[in-house]
Image (cartoon, rainbow, N blue to C red):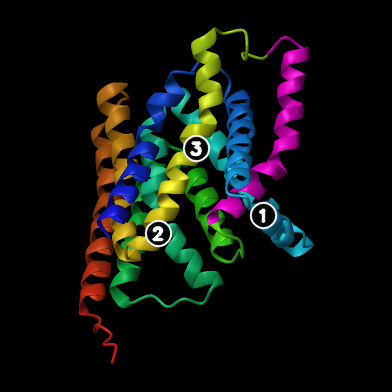
């Protein structure tokens, strides 16, 4: 279990430090970065499947149209999430991107209620309503919807919902998702190169290395998370996941000096209070469950 905890912390910490990585590439357009992220992630995942000698099993499991359709939807949702996140970070909206991932767990719970007929306990409804109130307050304060945060929360929440009902393992699923996005991403990058608009091989060795490294920083935390999910309780995973948006928020305010006004503090504070109530309620409910005795 200790190994699982450290795997989860490692995954969430890497995701939390992502703003620093993408800021190193702020001179590259978000679309081009996502193209490279898809291409190099796919390459690394193909290498992993090859090293594990699982191509035979992979081909047998992904050949059905029903599976391809599900993972095509997942691939589109993941691409949207990656694109909006990278654009938001490099456009100076790290604080708002962190809000999206603070909201995401509560949105995922709501999806379970609406589509999977999952039932919420009475005290779980309160934080969901409180988080909605926080978003409403920020909308009124901004004069517009915090669309970056909501797009990230909705796209990743829907992605998680699709993956919850999908049949493949995390490794096979992510490999198939990136393979489905590979051709459009590759064609787009070729277009940039032929029209001399691409940054790859034109911005120096460090920028090229970082673009290629996007596949590594994408794959490693996903594999760490898959390991953690097998070894520690879901409640603990749910609690540790707030490490990611917390780090993102702190990086936005303390490292890149994004503004954080009293108005934002009130709106964020409402969402944070909702998450605290939700986490405490989930923890207490988990503790109150009887321990199964194996005879």
Residue 229, numbered circle: 2
Q: Nearer the viewer, residue 91 or 187?
A: 187
Q: Nearer the viewer, residue 42 or 156?
A: 42
Q: Which residue is mark 1?
A: 71
- Say left or right for 286 vs 229: left
Residue 82 drawn above or below residue 161:
above
Disc 2 crowd, CA 10 A, few/some/many (<14, 14-19, 20+):
some
Whether residue 186 is visible here, answered yes or no, is yes
Q: Where's the C terminus, which quadrant?
A: bottom left
Residue 177 included in the magenta stretch of the image: yes
Q: Position of residue 129 (x, y in %)?
A: 36, 62
Residue 293 drawn above or below residue 288:
below
- Judging from the image, what secondary structure is the residue with disc 2 in? helix
- Say left or right for 83 vs 73: left
Residue at 68% over, 51% down: 55
Per the rendered image, the range of residues in magenta is: 170-197
The part of the image, by quadrant, that contains residue 92 is top left
Q: Which residue is mark 3?
A: 218
Q: In the image, which is nearer the foreground, mark 3 or mark 1?
A: 3
- Say left or right for 149 vs 269: right
Residue at 63% over, 38% down: 42
Q: In the image, which is nearer the foreground, mark 1 or mark 2?
A: 2
């Amino acid at each position: 279990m200790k190994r699982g905890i450290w795997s989860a912390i490692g995954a969430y910490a890497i995701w939390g430090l992502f703003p620093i990585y993408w800021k190193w590439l702020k001179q590259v357009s978000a679309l081009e970065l996502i193209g490279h992220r898809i291409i190099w992630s796919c390459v690394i995942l193909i290498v992993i499947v090859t090293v594990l000698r699982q191509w035979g099993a992979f081909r047998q499991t992904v050949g059905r149209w029903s599976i391809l359709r599900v993972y095509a939807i997942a691939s589109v949702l993941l691409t949207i999430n990656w694109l909006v996140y990278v654009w938001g970070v490099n456009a100076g909206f790290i604080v708002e991107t962190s809000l999206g991932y603070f909201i995401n767990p509560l949105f995922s719970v709501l999806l379970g209620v609406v589509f999977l007929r999952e039932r919420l306990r009475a005290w779980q409804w309160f934080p969901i309503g409180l988080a909605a109130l926080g978003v409403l307050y920020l909308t009124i304060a901004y004069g517009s919807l915090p669309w970056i945060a909501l797009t990230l929360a909705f796209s990743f929440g829907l992605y998680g919902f699709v993956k919850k009902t999908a049949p493949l393992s995390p490794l096979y699923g992510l490999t198939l998702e990136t393979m489905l996005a590979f051709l459009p991403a590759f064609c787009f990058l070729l277009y940039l190169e032929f029209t001399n608009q691409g940054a790859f091989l034109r911005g120096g060795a460090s920028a090229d290395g970082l673009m290629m490294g996007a596949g590594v920083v994408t794959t490693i935390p996903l594999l760490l998370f898959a390991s953690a999910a097998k070894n520690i309780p879901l409640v603990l995973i749910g609690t540790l996941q707030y490490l990611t948006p917390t780090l993102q928020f702190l990086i936005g305010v303390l490292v890149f000096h994004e503004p954080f006004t009293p108005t934002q503090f009130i709106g964020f504070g409402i969402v944070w209070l909702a998450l605290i109530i939700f986490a405490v309620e989930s923890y207490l409910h988990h503790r109150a469950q009887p321990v199964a005795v194996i005879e």
